[in-house]
Structure formats: C-alpha cells, structure tokens
Image: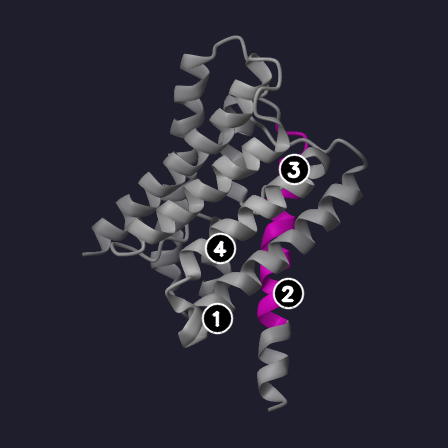
Amino acid sequence: MENKHYWAEFLGTFLLVFFGTGAIIISEEYNGILQAFGIGVVFGITVWLLVQFLGKFSDCHINPAVTITFCFNKTIEIKKALFYIFFQLLGAVLASLLLHYIFPSNQKLGNTIPSGSVWESFFLELGLSFILMGVIVVSNAVLSLKKWAPFLIGFTVFLEAWLAGPICGASMNPARSFGPSIISGTTDFLWIYFLAPILGMLFFLLISHFCNSKK
C-alpha cells in the first residue's frame, strides 16, 4: 500500500516540475510568451489538479518542506517521510533531465535564482512558504473548506508564483528547485530554496501550536 503512496509522490513531483519549469523554459525560448502571470497559472493549475486527483492515492505532499513539517507534527512517521522526500527529489531530477533533453540549449531549466539580494529572496521564500502551509492546514482542517482544499492550495501557488516569481522564483518547494539546479549545474543558491521553505512551514506549525495551546 505504501508503495502506491511513494510512486504517487514521485509522479506528482515529476509532473509539477515538468509542467511548471517547462512553462518557464517555453517562455524563455519563445520571447516571453507566457510571462509571470501565465507561468503562475501553469503552476497553480498543475498543483490544483495533482492535489485533486493524486490526493485519492497518497497524501500528495509533492514537496519535501510539507513532508518535513508534517513529520514534525507527527502526522507522518520518519521512515515514510524519508521515502517521500527521496521520491519527490527523484521525480524532480528526472523531470528536469527530460526537459534538458527536449530543450538542450536552455541553460537555466527553470531554476530558481534570486533577481535581487540573497536575503530578500530568503525571507520572501520563508514568508511565501508560511502562507502556503497555512492554506494547506486550514483548508484541510475546516470542514466547510475541505472540498475546496485542492483549488485553494493551487490558487495560492498561482498567486505566489505570479507576484513573487520574478523576484525570488517563488519555489516554496525544495524539490521544485532541486531538479533544475542539479541538472543545470547551478547550485549556488540552492540552500535558499531548501532552508527558507522548510523554516517557513515549520514556523507556521509553531505558531499554530502556540495559538491552540492558548485556547
């Protein structure tokens, strides 16, 4: 049964990176045809559909930062979380490898690179990830919102990718940055897109626990 979960995480992350970063590559290769709004739409719709349909077969984290946060929350055991993360990173790398084969002349492969200062991107990624985890938790916890959770999560990803993508890349997902970074060989800023999303989501968990303890 767990194997089904692992392969769903692999497939979900593969598709997220393939379509999301593929949109960035296409926009670069064809004179900015999509722009930030179009790229945000692709990321948002992809996440929405993945959560909607793969959520029936797995937890559909498709994001190591989400998996780590739920592991700290004891929603998922450590062994299972490690397998999730492995398959998420594997899916991301293979998606970027396929995109490299399709677009061999593209150097960045949709990699997340700060357009401004490193710390500007770090704190922006941290804040975006905090918000995304908030939407994930609240939309799944509130009964009246639960059926809308896939859409709300996808819409949040769309907004964040659209508004912050040109500044920091709006990764909110270590795997999404890992694949393009490894295959393109541009790893200088990878630490930002691992550390900031994980800390941002864990910070939401900490705030959530603090608020619940005060009730």
Q: Nearer the viewer, mark 2 or mark 4?
A: 4
To which residue does mark 2 refer?
Answer: 203
Residue 112, horizontal then vertical, whole percent? 62, 32
Secondary structure found at label 3: helix
Residue farthest right in this picture: 117
Specify which label sits upstream in the sequence, 1 or 4. 1
To which residue does mark 3 refer?
Answer: 165
Looking at the rendering, the stretch of residues picked out in magenta corresponds to: 187-206
Which residue is depicted at the point 57% across and 56% down? 132
Secondary structure found at label 2: helix
Residue type indicated by callout 1: Asn
To which residue does mark 1 refer?
Answer: 73
**Residue 83 visible in the current orientation:** yes
To which residue does mark 4 refer?
Answer: 153
Specify which label sits upstream in the sequence, 2 or 1. 1
Which residue is depicted at the point 57% across and 69% down? 205
Residue 206, horizontal then vertical, whole percent? 61, 72
Secondary structure found at label 4: helix
Q: Is residue 207 above or below residue 24?
A: below
Queried whether the magenta region covers residue 199, the answer comes back as yes
| Quadrant assignment for the C terminus | bottom right
Q: Which quadrant holds residue 98?
A: top left
Specify which label sits upstream in the sequence, 3 or 4. 4
Inter-mark Cα distance, 2 to 4: 18 Å
Residue farthest bottom in this picture: 215
